[in-house]
Amino acid sequence: MVKVINDLKNFALKSKRVWLALKKPTRKEFES
């Protein structure tokens, strides 16, 4: 059971990192 919880935590962290990378505004959007 603990392993499942740890896997979910790791997955959430990875997803957040990917989400932030995707959402990072490009320079064009930033300047407009």
Image (cartoon, helix red, strand yellow):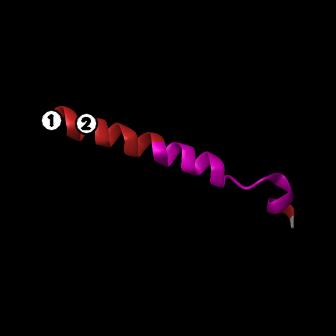
Across and down, in percent, residue 1 comes to 12, 37
Screen quadrant of the C terminus: bottom right
Name which residue lies at 25% across and 36% down.
6
Residue under label 1, please give it. Answer: 2
Q: Is 9 placed above or below 32 here?
A: above
**Amino acid type, callout 1:** Val
Name which residue lies at 15% across and 35% down.
2
How many dots with numbers? 2
Q: Secondary structure at mark 2?
A: helix
Q: How far separated are the C-alphas under marks 2 and 1?
A: 6 Å
Residue under label 2, please give it. Answer: 6
Across and down, in percent, residue 19 comes to 56, 50
Label 2 crowd bin: few (<14), some (14–19), many (20+), radius 10 Å:
few
The magenta-colored residue range is 15-30
Q: Is 24 placed above or below 6 here?
A: below
Name which residue lies at 39% across and 46% down.
12
Label 1 crowd bin: few (<14), some (14–19), many (20+), radius 10 Å:
few
Q: Determine which of the numbered discs, if any, sits on residue 30 in the image.
A: none
Horizontal arrangement in the rendering, residue 24 relative to residue 29 (left or right)? left
Across and down, in percent, residue 25 comes to 73, 56
**Amino acid type, callout 2:** Asn
Depth order, front residue of 20/4: 4
Can you name the residue that lies furthest to the top here?
3
- Dot 2 and dot 1 residues touching (CB under 8 Å): yes
Across and down, in percent, residue 21 comes to 62, 46
Dominant secondary structure of the residues highlighted in magenta in the image = helix
Name which residue lies at 86% across and 57% down.
28
